[in-house]
Image (cartoon, rainbow, N blue to C red):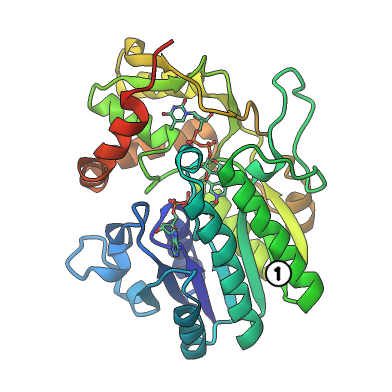
Amino acid sequence: MTIIVTGGAGFIGSNFIFHMLEKHPDYRIVCIDKLTYAGNLSTLACVLDKNSKDYKPDWAERFRFVKLDICDREGVFKLFEEEKPDIVINFAAESHVDRSIEDPGVFLQTNIIGTSVLMDACRKYGVERYHQVSTDEVYGDLPLDRPDLFFTEDTPIHTSSPYSSSKAGADLLVMAYNRTYGLPVTISRCSNNYGPYHFPEKLIPLMIANCLNDKPLPVYGEGLNVRDWLYVEDHCRAIDLIVHKGRVGEVYNVGGHNEMRNIDIVKLICKELGKPESLITHVTDRKGHDMRYAIDPTKIHNELGWLPETKFADGIKKTIGWYLDNRSWWEEIISGEYQKYYDKMYGSRGTL
Ligand code: NAD
Ligand code: DAU
């Protein structure tokens, strides 16, 4: 079995590759990644770098990395011709809402056009399954005063940001390729992930890194927005189940009923790291900021028996522990180009 995983040098894609190499000793994984600012080869050290203390020869011999843009039609078709994959799982995306608000163009290119290129290659070479890793953000947001409401697979698509709109556009294309060409597709729509290798522009790793550097903790607005957090390994297990046992043409929501307000997460991180809450700085809100996300995971539970295994209280401790043990991974990232991004996004942001 050969599986092409796109975006595998990023946060969830890399965790998924490690999950698959561990759980399926007879699978080969071919990772395609453009290595944008969010992709790091150091994340894949355990399968690429013989000198790394984490190197796993048994995984490495079943792994291939190819630096490739999913929008590069010729390159993608050539790789499919060579590899003849059985399954293709598309994690590759521009993934940060704030960046999409600054510059939507590349989101449309990678998230929509890239998806269509991959599916065209799947049509030409034939695959057992094309799986699209989507997001709960395609459903828009829920009001804070209606805790009884959740996103189901039937909730209408109703996006807020250029990022979520590009993901929704891709989802529509995926369903169209199923109906029009009979491509065997599935889609997963997951809530917010956290865990190892999460790029430090996102809430949890940004707050951990800033806490450790005694820097201000920039909470957008009052920090009352709610996200439904899931440990990344639980998401990886869900995708593994969907590609093997999920029904073709179906969407599966993935989430663990773990709603938290941003401000409470930031306070928890301060507490775990022994840092004062006075580091918290309320800054100008994100434009079009979604209020609450909350997934109803009944379908994936009933059909595939999936349940989250990691409780937030344990997952956040493990995550903080990982950032403490792997300082060089994130310190290298935040020391380069990222600093320019940080100054642009936060330098001129007003405080409340
Ligand atoms: P990430 O930003 O950490 O990683 C994205 C990866 O894709 C990077 O390695 C990057 O180099 C690569 N990439 C970007 N453009 C590419 C292109 N044109 N061609 C090839 N590779 C390219 O993202 P993530 O948080 O790991 O998210 C992965 C997927 O999961 C995305 O599709 C995202 O929409 C979805 N998702 C994320 C979350 C979350 O909480 N992070 C939740 C639900 C769904
Ligand atoms: O719900 C799934 C989505 O979760 C994924 O599709 C996206 O790829 C992923 O980035 C994530 O989107 P969010 O916008 O929810 O994640 P982010 O970590 O950027 O922000 C989480 C919340 O924290 C959000 O309400 C904004 C807030 N925030 C974020 C940052 C970076 C702050 O208050 N301060 C910050 O500095």
Residue at image mark 1:
185
Quadrant placement of the C terminus: top left
Q: Secondary structure at mark 1?
A: strand
Residue 285 vertical position relative to residue 63 in the rendered view, above or below: above
Toward which corner of the image does residue 252 lie, by quadrant? bottom right
Instruction: Classify mark 1: residues with Cα within 10 Å, few (<14), some (14-19) or many (20+).
Output: many
* Quadrant in which residue 60 is drawn: bottom left
Q: Is residue 247 visible?
A: no
Q: Could you say where residue 291 lies in the image, as x and y percent from the top left?
A: 63, 26
Q: Residue 159: percent from the left, percent from the top?
A: 68, 41
User: Is ligand 1 less than 8 Å from the beta carbon at label 1?
Assistant: no
Residue 319 in percent (x, y) is at 39, 39
* Side of 90 relative to 72 (left or right): right
Image quadrant of residue 237?
Answer: bottom right
Residue 175 in sight: yes
Lateral position of residue 245 relative to residue 7, left or right? right
The N terminus, quarter of image: bottom right
Q: Which is nearer the eye, 47 or 38?
A: 38
What amino acid is at disc 1? Val
Is 146 on the left or on the right of 341, as rendered?
Answer: right
For image coordinates 77% across by 61% down, the residue present is: 250
Residue name at image x 56 percent, y 45 percent? 163
